[in-house]
Amino acid sequence: MKRLFYDILIFFGLRKKPLEHGKGVNIKRCYGNANNAINKIRAATHPKYKDDNRREYHLIQGGQKFDYMWAIRSPFPEHNNAWIGGWYDYNKRQCWVACNPNDFNDYSDAVQEHEVAHDIEARLKLVPPWHNNLWGNLFVEWRNLPGVSSVKDKERGIVVDFIDTGLYMNK
């Protein structure tokens, strides 16, 4: 009965839906990474930006480590099995980051900041296109460097940056 009451409050906009972060997420670390991204954006282009802190954070077990980040084979067929370090789901406001399969705390903070920056781009209505040119030096792999591509998947509501398997290989 209590849950029904909260669902009614959420339906009428009198209460916010609780965030559902993924398994193994260290929420304080995620908020720290989000604050780093927000501060970079405020300093660079939007000093009055106010964040609502309503994005969700998720980790996915990686399969390969590339230099500084864990990556997985893209689950999206059109990416031709490319490696990705994370993605942003703009329909659900979820930031996904690949992590060590044996340690959820082993992932790249820079990749998480990058995904948060995609969320901020959407909140500021700077997209499409993705990867705001004014933020080119703020976030890891933000520019379209050789071997790195950014793709908006309209059907699934996601933005994926993927890398060529021959680059950034950790030996």
Image: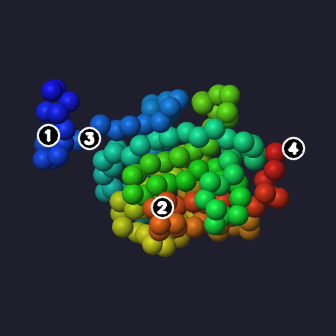
User: Helix or strand or loop: what does disc 3 sit on?
Assistant: loop
Q: Amino acid at mark 3?
A: Lys
- Quadrant (top left, top right, bottom left, bottom right) of the N terminus: top left
Disc 4: which residue = 171
Whole-number angstrom distance, CA of label 2 to CA of label 1:
29 Å
**Residue under the image location 45 percent in, 61 percent down:** 157
Front residue of 80 and 46 = 80
Q: Amino acid at mark 4?
A: Lys
**Residue under the image location 34 percent in, 44 percent down:** 53
Disc 2: which residue = 156
Mark with earlier residue (4, 1): 1
Front residue of 38 and 81 = 81
User: Helix or strand or loop: what does disc 1 sit on?
Assistant: helix
Q: Amino acid at mark 1?
A: Leu
Front residue of 5 and 137 = 5
Whole-number angstrom distance, CA of label 3 to CA of label 4:
44 Å
Mark with earlier residue (2, 1): 1
Relative to 87, 38 lies left or right: left
- Quadrant (top left, top right, bottom left, bottom right) of the C terminus: top right
Disc 3: which residue = 17
Relative to 13, 159 lies left or right: right
Disc 1: which residue = 9
**Residue under the image location 40 percent in, 62 percent down:** 122
Q: Residues within 10 Å of mark 2 (few under 14, many from 20)?
A: few
Q: Residues within 10 Å of mark 4 (few under 14, many from 20)?
A: few
Whole-number angstrom distance, CA of label 3 to CA of label 2:
22 Å
